[in-house]
Amino acid sequence: WVLLCKTVLWQHPAAIYLLFIGFSFLFVKFLEQELRQKRARLIHPAPVMGVDVLTKPIPVLEKRKRSLSPRRTRKGGNSSPKAISWKKFSELVETKTFDSCRSNCSPRKLLATLVTGWRYNTQDVVEFKIEFRMDQEVFCSWKRYSDMHTYDQAIRSLLNDHELSTLAEFPRKSTFGEYVTGRDKDECFLRARCRCLEKYMQSIMYGDDFREDTRITIASYTRDFFVPHVASQM
């Protein structure tokens, strides 16, 4: 092959130019492909846990034990490393749209605050109000259920009215009705209720039907809402 190439190039000098042009074309194509891949990596970076939350939701349920850390203060406040301060969270939600709030603190911290707020806050009155607006109209308001006798009835009505029961994950042998009609402070019912609410919050965060003017208003929580030994096992 070497001798053949030498003979051809010696007898046909124009082949040298053709060979150079061919190699140059391949080299340009290679550089173009490398630049295209680099630009794609800059525009769409690889998903990182805790960073790329908009394109790939974080599996919050798998990290529940870390979110519900036993490090807390009994007399009030929140010392959990996974949750932001209650004052900061309230200010973000009350003064800005939910889209801005989401950009300031990650959904994992928001959910951790929502779940752990019941355990850390010392207020006696439970008033959990969720409002989200779509096309300048109130789509759902927690005030509709404030006249219920118990929180269990309110959350049950909310889930049934908006068909959110499919968002919750339950063991195969149990049905949604068995969890919802469970007795007060029952371990299974508390687990299901917390899981329903968390999935509900996830649907608000990652749902395609909600606009940028989505807002959540949290009035107050109580630390004694969950049974301590149940909350520690969740």
Image: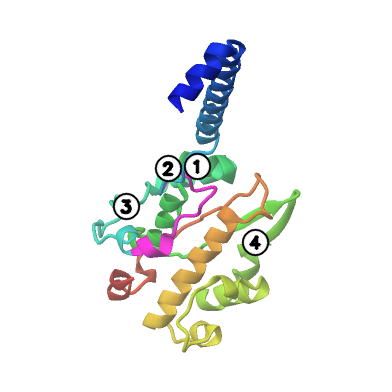
Look at label 1 and name its amino acid.
Answer: Leu
Asked if residue 194 is among those painted magenta in the image, a careful observer would answer no
Q: Alpha carbon of mark 2 to alpha carbon of mark 4: how far? A: 23 Å
Query: Which circle's residue, 1 or 3, is located before the other in the chain?
Result: 3
Look at the numbered discs 4 and 3 and tell me whether their residues touch, using CB distance below 8 Å: no
Q: Alpha carbon of mark 2 to alpha carbon of mark 1: how far? A: 6 Å
Name the quadrant containing residue 130.
bottom right
Q: What colouring style does the render use?
A: rainbow
| In front of the other: 10 or 210 | 10
Residue range highlighted in magenta = 50-64
Q: Position of residue 120 (x, y in %)?
A: 33, 59
Mark 2 is surrounded, within 10 Å at the Cα level, by few (under 14), some (14 to 19) or many (20 or more) other residues, namely: few
Q: Residue at x 65, y 67 (%)?
A: 144
| In front of the other: 62 or 41 | 41
Q: Which residue is mark 3?
A: 78
Q: Alpha carbon of mark 4 to alpha carbon of mark 3: how far? A: 27 Å
Q: Residue at x 64, y 54 (%)?
A: 132
Q: Which residue is mark 4?
A: 141
Look at label 2 and name its amino acid.
Answer: Lys
Q: Which residue is mark 2?
A: 88
Q: Residue at x 40, y 82 (%)?
A: 188
Q: Residue at x 46, y 70 (%)?
A: 195
Look at the numbered discs 2 and 1 and tell me whether their residues touch, using CB distance below 8 Å: yes
Q: Alpha carbon of mark 1 to alpha carbon of mark 3: how far? A: 17 Å
Can residue 129 be seen in the rendering of this structure? no
Secondary structure of the residue carrying numbered label 2: helix
Can residue 227 be seen in the rendering of this structure? yes
Look at label 4 and name its amino acid.
Answer: Ser
Query: Which circle's residue, 1 or 4, is located before the other in the chain?
Result: 1
Q: Which residue is mark 1?
A: 92
Secondary structure of the residue carrying numbered label 4: strand
